[in-house]
Image (spheres, helix red, strand yellow):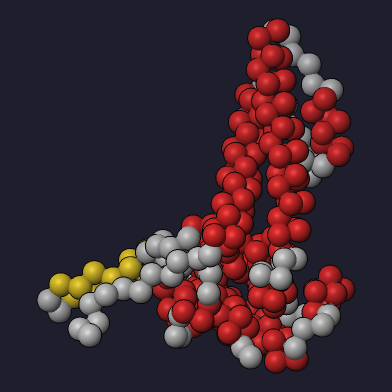
Amino acid sequence: MAGALTVVAVPPASHEAARDLARAREQVRADLMRSRHRLSKLLLRHGRVYDQSSWTKTHRRWLGSQRFEHVNTELAFLDNLAACEGLLARREALDERLSLVARDAEFWPIVSRLRAFRGIDTLSALVIVLEVGDFARFPRAVQLGSWLGLVPSRQQSGESDTHGPITKTGSRYARRILVEAAWHYLRQPRVGVTLAARHEGLPDHVLQIAWRAQHRLHRVHQRLRSHRKPPNVVNVAVARELSCFLWAAATAP
């Protein structure tokens, strides 16, 4: 009655199990990135630089052709390379399983709506759905951005009111995906072939929300950059507004 209690959303067991699998995939992704960095730094120390696109089939053949004078160095290189290959195989297996999970009737209605937005495909939409849970538990869109930790921190003392870096509360997995997706809105608004295929079968009002998001977020990118704001600061601001558009699409009738 006093309003001093905080409501906690307890997800169903199936929802929590799927979230565990999605987080496992995110952890493998991070481990793979670190392994690739270690491998590239080892090559860099020995003056081996690949000047084209990394981690393609051509790059993989180039890695396989590398030889070193000392046996111990070559063993260290092969160990790092095997770690990258093993983690890549694990990520692909988890991606395949999560693609099936996303099609489950429990998740697909919302996942399909989030896929209508530029920069968000099946797996990223599934992670957001699993991390947020019930979008309707947030009465307003801005509360979702606050829950995700995309709002500036504030320090108030007397007459001073200082704004600091974002709070980074809530799910770091969903926050990372939103920040990465926000970079896509730097380009001019358009619906390409891939995005148009994801739009098939969705309600018109959801498509209108996604289209307004493209225009709005592109303008935010341009306006804040014209004010010489740092690119990362601009992108986080776009990610915060993107979360509001996702809330609107997920909670729309």
Q: Where is residue 39 in the image (x, y as percent from the top left)?
A: 66, 29
Q: Residue at x 72, y 32 (%)?
A: 86
Tell me the quadrant of the picture where the N terminus can be found. bottom left
Horizontal side, residue 84 vs residue 199: left or right? left
Horizontal side, residue 232 vs residue 93: left or right? left
Tell me the quadrant of the picture where the C terminus can be found. bottom right
Task: Give the number of callouts.
Answer: 0
Q: Residue at x 15, y 72 (%)?
A: 157
Q: Position of residue 103 (x, y in %)?
A: 75, 66
Residue at the front extreme of this rendering: 13
Horizontal side, residue 230 vs residue 36: left or right? left
Q: Where is residue 27 in the image (x, y as percent from the top left)?
A: 58, 45
> 13 or 114, which lies in front?
13
Q: Residue at x 60, y 39 (%)?
A: 31
Q: Does 168 sit above or below residue 58?
A: below
Q: Where is residue 8 in the image (x, y as percent from the top left)?
A: 38, 70
Q: In which quarter of the image is residue 150?
A: bottom left
Horizontal side, residue 220 vs residue 140: left or right? right
Q: Quadrant of residue 220?
A: bottom right
Residue at the left extreme of this rendering: 158
> 139 or 108, which lies in front?
108
Q: Is residue 216 visible?
A: no
Q: Which residue is drawn at 69% across and 86% down?
A: 206
Q: Does 171 sit above or below residue 161?
A: above
Q: In which quarter of the image is residue 162?
A: bottom left
> 165 or 139, which lies in front?
139
Q: Is residue 69 visible?
A: yes
Q: Does 225 sit above or below residue 46?
A: below
